[in-house]
Image (tube, coloured by chain):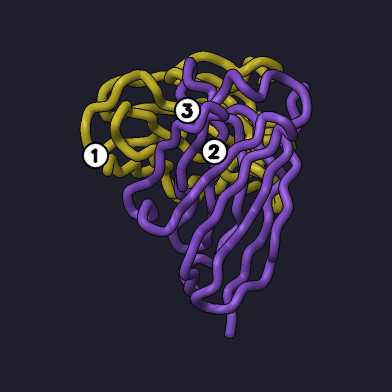
Chain colours: A yellow, B purple
Protein backbone atom coordinates (compact mmCIF):
# COMPACT_ATOMS: atom_id res chain seq x y z
CA UNK A 1 0.00 0.00 0.00
CA UNK A 2 1.04 3.60 -0.56
CA UNK A 3 1.57 5.28 2.81
CA UNK A 4 0.60 8.93 3.18
CA UNK A 5 2.34 10.92 5.91
CA UNK A 6 1.13 14.34 6.91
CA UNK A 7 3.06 17.01 8.75
CA UNK A 8 2.67 18.52 11.14
CA UNK A 9 0.27 16.40 13.16
CA UNK A 10 -0.93 19.49 14.98
CA UNK A 11 -0.66 23.09 13.89
CA UNK A 12 -1.43 26.10 16.07
CA UNK A 13 -2.30 29.30 14.26
CA UNK A 14 -4.33 32.49 14.54
CA UNK A 15 -7.13 33.95 12.48
CA UNK A 16 -5.62 35.66 9.46
CA UNK A 17 -2.51 33.48 9.37
CA UNK A 18 -1.29 31.70 6.26
CA UNK A 19 -0.74 28.00 6.94
CA UNK A 20 0.61 25.07 4.95
CA UNK A 21 0.09 21.36 5.55
CA UNK A 22 2.32 18.81 3.83
CA UNK A 23 1.47 15.31 2.68
CA UNK A 24 4.20 12.93 1.58
CA UNK A 25 3.62 9.68 -0.30
CA UNK A 26 5.77 6.59 0.20
CA UNK A 27 6.15 6.36 -3.57
CA UNK A 28 5.49 8.61 -6.52
CA UNK A 29 1.78 8.95 -7.19
CA UNK A 30 -0.25 10.49 -9.96
CA UNK A 31 -2.04 13.81 -9.57
CA UNK A 32 -4.92 12.03 -7.82
CA UNK A 33 -4.27 13.69 -4.50
CA UNK A 34 -7.18 15.14 -2.53
CA UNK A 35 -7.66 17.13 0.64
CA UNK A 36 -10.57 16.90 3.06
CA UNK A 37 -11.62 18.97 6.05
CA UNK A 38 -13.32 17.32 9.01
CA UNK A 39 -15.10 19.12 11.81
CA UNK A 40 -15.67 17.22 15.10
CA UNK A 41 -18.52 14.74 14.83
CA UNK A 42 -18.96 15.34 11.11
CA UNK A 43 -18.04 13.50 7.94
CA UNK A 44 -15.02 14.66 5.97
CA UNK A 45 -15.71 17.37 3.41
CA UNK A 46 -13.92 17.44 0.08
CA UNK A 47 -11.87 20.59 -0.46
CA UNK A 48 -9.43 19.88 -3.29
CA UNK A 49 -9.10 17.12 -5.87
CA UNK A 50 -6.46 16.26 -8.47
CA UNK A 51 -3.83 18.08 -6.40
CA UNK A 52 -4.98 21.62 -7.09
CA UNK A 53 -8.61 21.71 -8.29
CA UNK A 54 -10.96 23.46 -5.90
CA UNK A 55 -14.22 21.65 -5.20
CA UNK A 56 -17.32 23.70 -6.00
CA UNK A 57 -18.32 25.97 -3.14
CA UNK A 58 -14.97 25.83 -1.37
CA UNK A 59 -13.49 29.27 -0.61
CA UNK A 60 -10.59 30.38 -2.75
CA UNK A 61 -8.34 30.83 0.30
CA UNK A 62 -7.78 27.08 0.05
CA UNK A 63 -5.24 25.92 -2.51
CA UNK A 64 -3.27 22.80 -3.26
CA UNK A 65 -0.06 22.02 -5.07
CA UNK A 66 2.62 19.40 -5.45
CA UNK A 67 3.71 16.42 -7.47
CA UNK A 68 5.27 12.98 -7.25
CA UNK A 69 5.69 12.38 -3.50
CA UNK A 70 5.15 15.80 -1.92
CA UNK A 71 1.92 17.75 -1.83
CA UNK A 72 0.72 20.77 0.12
CA UNK A 73 -2.52 22.36 1.23
CA UNK A 74 -2.35 26.08 1.88
CA UNK A 75 -4.93 28.27 3.57
CA UNK A 76 -4.06 31.85 2.71
CA UNK A 77 -5.88 33.64 5.53
CA UNK A 78 -7.36 31.51 8.28
CA UNK A 79 -10.98 32.06 9.20
CA UNK A 80 -12.60 30.86 12.44
CA UNK A 81 -14.45 28.07 10.61
CA UNK A 82 -11.18 26.66 9.24
CA UNK A 83 -10.05 25.23 12.58
CA UNK A 84 -10.57 21.53 11.98
CA UNK A 85 -8.67 18.39 11.04
CA UNK A 86 -7.36 18.00 7.49
CA UNK A 87 -6.65 14.76 5.62
CA UNK A 88 -4.95 13.99 2.36
CA UNK A 89 -6.01 11.02 0.25
CA UNK A 90 -4.38 9.37 -2.74
CA UNK A 91 -5.85 7.29 -5.52
CA UNK A 92 -3.69 5.09 -7.69
CA UNK A 93 -5.35 2.56 -10.01
CA UNK A 94 -5.03 -1.06 -8.84
CA UNK A 95 -3.79 0.08 -5.42
CA UNK A 96 -5.77 0.63 -2.20
CA UNK A 97 -7.01 4.15 -1.62
CA UNK A 98 -5.16 5.54 1.38
CA UNK A 99 -5.43 8.57 3.64
CA UNK A 100 -2.94 10.55 5.66
CA UNK A 101 -3.20 10.37 9.43
CA UNK A 102 -4.57 13.90 9.69
CA UNK A 103 -3.41 17.36 10.73
CA UNK A 104 -5.30 19.08 13.51
CA UNK A 105 -5.41 22.83 13.01
CA UNK A 106 -6.04 24.55 16.32
CA UNK A 107 -6.41 28.09 17.50
CA UNK A 108 -3.25 29.56 18.98
CA UNK B 1 -28.09 17.90 -4.42
CA UNK B 2 -26.86 14.45 -3.50
CA UNK B 3 -27.50 13.19 0.01
CA UNK B 4 -26.54 9.91 1.61
CA UNK B 5 -28.34 8.57 4.65
CA UNK B 6 -27.00 5.51 6.41
CA UNK B 7 -28.16 3.19 9.14
CA UNK B 8 -27.39 -0.15 10.73
CA UNK B 9 -26.72 -1.96 13.97
CA UNK B 10 -24.50 -0.02 16.33
CA UNK B 11 -23.57 -2.69 18.89
CA UNK B 12 -22.24 -6.09 17.93
CA UNK B 13 -20.68 -8.99 19.76
CA UNK B 14 -17.37 -10.48 18.61
CA UNK B 15 -17.77 -12.87 15.66
CA UNK B 16 -21.07 -11.29 14.58
CA UNK B 17 -21.65 -9.71 11.18
CA UNK B 18 -21.74 -5.96 10.72
CA UNK B 19 -24.47 -4.79 8.38
CA UNK B 20 -24.92 -1.20 7.21
CA UNK B 21 -27.06 0.32 4.48
CA UNK B 22 -26.88 3.68 2.76
CA UNK B 23 -29.67 5.32 0.78
CA UNK B 24 -28.83 7.82 -1.92
CA UNK B 25 -31.10 10.78 -2.57
CA UNK B 26 -30.61 12.87 -5.69
CA UNK B 27 -28.18 12.45 -8.52
CA UNK B 28 -27.72 9.37 -10.66
CA UNK B 29 -27.29 6.23 -8.56
CA UNK B 30 -26.44 4.01 -11.49
CA UNK B 31 -23.65 6.21 -12.83
CA UNK B 32 -21.25 6.08 -9.90
CA UNK B 33 -19.33 3.80 -7.62
CA UNK B 34 -20.43 3.93 -3.99
CA UNK B 35 -18.00 3.34 -1.20
CA UNK B 36 -17.45 2.65 2.46
CA UNK B 37 -14.76 4.20 4.65
CA UNK B 38 -14.23 3.73 8.35
CA UNK B 39 -12.51 5.89 10.92
CA UNK B 40 -10.82 4.89 14.14
CA UNK B 41 -8.72 6.95 16.56
CA UNK B 42 -5.81 4.59 16.03
CA UNK B 43 -5.77 3.97 12.27
CA UNK B 44 -7.53 7.09 11.06
CA UNK B 45 -9.49 6.88 7.82
CA UNK B 46 -9.45 3.47 6.17
CA UNK B 47 -10.92 2.69 2.76
CA UNK B 48 -13.05 -0.46 2.88
CA UNK B 49 -14.16 -0.67 -0.72
CA UNK B 50 -16.70 0.41 -3.29
CA UNK B 51 -19.40 -0.98 -5.53
CA UNK B 52 -20.96 0.00 -8.83
CA UNK B 53 -24.67 -0.76 -9.20
CA UNK B 54 -23.72 -3.03 -12.10
CA UNK B 55 -22.14 -5.27 -9.46
CA UNK B 56 -18.49 -4.43 -9.98
CA UNK B 57 -16.61 -4.15 -6.69
CA UNK B 58 -13.21 -3.09 -5.38
CA UNK B 59 -12.25 -4.13 -1.86
CA UNK B 60 -9.34 -3.25 0.36
CA UNK B 61 -7.13 -6.37 0.34
CA UNK B 62 -6.74 -6.11 4.09
CA UNK B 63 -10.49 -6.64 4.57
CA UNK B 64 -11.42 -8.47 1.39
CA UNK B 65 -11.91 -11.87 2.98
CA UNK B 66 -14.61 -10.51 5.32
CA UNK B 67 -16.32 -7.87 3.16
CA UNK B 68 -19.32 -8.09 0.88
CA UNK B 69 -20.98 -5.11 -0.74
CA UNK B 70 -24.24 -5.02 -2.63
CA UNK B 71 -26.33 -2.40 -4.40
CA UNK B 72 -30.01 -2.14 -5.34
CA UNK B 73 -30.96 0.20 -8.14
CA UNK B 74 -34.69 -0.12 -7.36
CA UNK B 75 -34.19 1.53 -3.97
CA UNK B 76 -30.98 3.52 -4.60
CA UNK B 77 -29.38 1.70 -1.70
CA UNK B 78 -26.06 0.03 -1.20
CA UNK B 79 -24.92 -2.10 1.69
CA UNK B 80 -21.87 -3.32 3.55
CA UNK B 81 -21.46 -6.63 5.33
CA UNK B 82 -18.37 -7.34 7.39
CA UNK B 83 -18.18 -10.78 8.94
CA UNK B 84 -16.47 -12.04 12.08
CA UNK B 85 -16.07 -8.65 13.71
CA UNK B 86 -13.63 -8.07 16.54
CA UNK B 87 -12.87 -5.12 18.77
CA UNK B 88 -10.53 -3.86 16.04
CA UNK B 89 -13.59 -3.23 13.85
CA UNK B 90 -14.95 -0.65 16.26
CA UNK B 91 -15.15 2.52 14.21
CA UNK B 92 -17.32 5.18 12.68
CA UNK B 93 -18.40 3.85 9.30
CA UNK B 94 -19.15 6.25 6.47
CA UNK B 95 -20.79 5.66 3.12
CA UNK B 96 -19.76 7.96 0.29
CA UNK B 97 -19.96 8.52 -3.44
CA UNK B 98 -16.79 7.72 -5.39
CA UNK B 99 -16.10 10.32 -8.06
CA UNK B 100 -13.74 8.49 -10.40
CA UNK B 101 -12.95 11.59 -12.45
CA UNK B 102 -11.31 13.23 -9.48
CA UNK B 103 -10.34 10.10 -7.59
CA UNK B 104 -12.26 11.30 -4.54
CA UNK B 105 -15.24 10.72 -2.31
CA UNK B 106 -17.31 13.82 -2.95
CA UNK B 107 -20.51 13.16 -0.97
CA UNK B 108 -20.59 11.44 2.42
CA UNK B 109 -23.17 10.00 4.74
CA UNK B 110 -23.45 11.16 8.31
CA UNK B 111 -21.49 8.26 9.74
CA UNK B 112 -22.47 5.43 12.05
CA UNK B 113 -20.59 4.32 15.15
CA UNK B 114 -20.22 0.58 15.40
CA UNK B 115 -19.06 -0.87 18.69
CA UNK B 116 -17.97 -4.45 19.24
CA UNK B 117 -18.22 -5.75 22.78
CA UNK B 118 -19.01 -8.99 24.52
Image mark for residue A26: 1
**Circle 3 SS class:** strand
Q: Is residue B109 above or below residue A70?
A: below
Left or right of residue B68: residue A55: right
Name which residue lies at 26% across and 23% down. A68
Q: Is residue B33 among what the camera can see? A: yes
Taking depth in this image into account, of A87 and A21 the one nearest to the observer is: A87
State the residue position of label 3.
Answer: A34
- Say if mark 1 contacts mark 3, CB within 8 Å: no
Name which residue lies at 51% across and 59% down. B82
Q: Position of residue A35 (x, y in %)?
A: 51, 31
Crowding near the residue tagged with mark 1, few <14, some 14–19, many ≥20 C-alpha atoms within 10 Å? few
Dot placed on the residue nearer the N-terminal end, 1 or 3: 1
Tell me the CA gap for discs 3 and 2: 16 Å
Image mark for residue A46: none
Quadrant hosting residue B108:
top right
Given the image, what chain letter belongs to the residue carrying mark 3? A
State the residue position of label 2.
Answer: B35
Taking depth in this image into account, of A88 and B107 the one nearest to the observer is: B107
Given the image, what chain letter belongs to the residue carrying mark 2? B
Name which residue lies at 63% across and 40% down. B78
Q: Is residue B90 above or below residue A97?
A: below
Tell me the CA gap for discs 1 and 2: 24 Å
Q: Position of residue B25 (x, y in %)?
A: 77, 29
Tell me the CA gap for discs 1 and 3: 16 Å
Left or right of residue A63: residue A84: right
Given the image, what chain letter belongs to the residue carrying mark 1? A
Crowding near the residue tagged with mark 2, few <14, some 14–19, many ≥20 C-alpha atoms within 10 Å? many
Taking depth in this image into account, of A99 and B59 the one nearest to the observer is: B59
Amino acid sequence: DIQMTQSPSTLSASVGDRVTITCRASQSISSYLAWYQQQPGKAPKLLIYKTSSLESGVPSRFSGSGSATEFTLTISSLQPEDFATYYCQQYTPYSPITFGQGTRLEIK
Amino acid sequence: QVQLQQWGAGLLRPSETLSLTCTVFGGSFSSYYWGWIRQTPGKGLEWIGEIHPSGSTNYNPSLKSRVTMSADTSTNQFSLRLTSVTAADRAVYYCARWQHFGGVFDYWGQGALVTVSS
